[in-house]
Amino acid sequence: MKLENRIAIVTGAAKGMGEAITLRLASEGADLLLAARDIDALEAVAVKVRDLGRRAEVIGADVTNEGQVRAMIARALEAFGGRIDVLVNIAGVTGPIETPVWKLEQEGFDYVTTANIRGTFLPMKHVLPTMIAQGAGRVINIGGSSGLRGYRYRAAYSASKWAVRGLSKTAALDVGEYGVTVNVVCPGIVETPRMQKLCREKARVRGWTVEKVYQEYVDDMALKRVTTPEDVAGAVLFLASDDARNITGQEVVVDGGWAV
């Protein structure tokens, strides 16, 4: 197995992409610390990990709170013998939808950028000393293809995903000499309850049907196929494995050709 006996932390592991990525890593041999704010949902995912024969610990954590992130890393080190091999930062928010820049409230902008940028930065900050000491580690941040091109009426979200790319590239330069890689997976729209909510809100604002909004996304993709959580999980697994040992500071785009 590609991740046999490796230790991974996954933030935002409770639902959607987080669950799919967690189970993919576990199926390839990883033991995991799962973090999110929804403990009940985390516990349900942890049961599935244990059914695969791997260890799973859960912790409630707000990744924008440094004290809670510090406690999350300490819990992983205590539970798994002082080693952390993989960090996957998934936790994030979508924020205001169908809102042009001049109508975007500061509070909405700050909410998105804080969650998506600080919520990626803090777990990296607190896990990297362990990986540096080990002389090895994999950090995979979930960005978005909206961080590769403009995204109309989604200024806060797009800005945050551009920032995740910049943060990841810079961190890759900082830690490369220690054998640690930092990369980004950039999904487009993904077939999850979050996508359904997005389509409903766009439909409401535009006066469209949900089906018309969904089809607009499909029509924008070269492959005419919406990404699944399992598609994203495959890219994360690749970057977490030894197959990607000489890849760092890069983006793997999984969006059906939306950002081409």
Image (cartoon, helix red, strand yellow):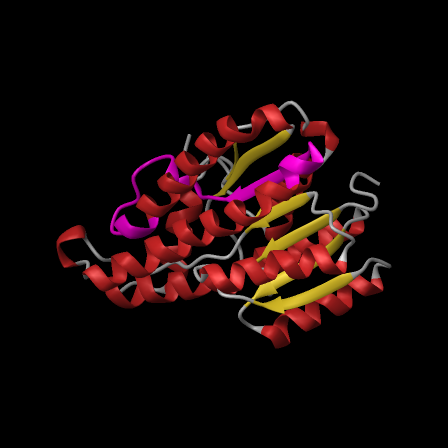
Looking at the image, can residue 239 be seen?
Answer: yes
- Of residue 1 and residue 69, the one placed in the foreground of this image is 69
Give percent across and percent down for residue 234: 66, 42
Q: In terms of depth relative to the viewer, which is nearer, 199 or 187? A: 187
| Residue at the image position 74 percent from the left and 30 percent from the top | 242
On the picture, is 225 further left or further right than 53?
left
Classify residue 236 by image quadrant.
top right
- Quadrant where the N terminus sits is top right
Q: Is residue 134 magenta?
A: yes
* Residue 16 relative to residue 240: left or right: left
* Residue sitting at x 60%, y 32%: 181
Q: Which residues are magenta?
A: 131-157
Position in image of residue 67 (x %, y %): 49, 63
Residue drawn where x is 34% and y is 51% of the image: 157
The image quarter in which residue 210 lies: bottom left
* Residue 98: percent from left, percent from top: 26, 57
| Residue at 29% across, 63% down | 208
Residue 230: within the magenta? no
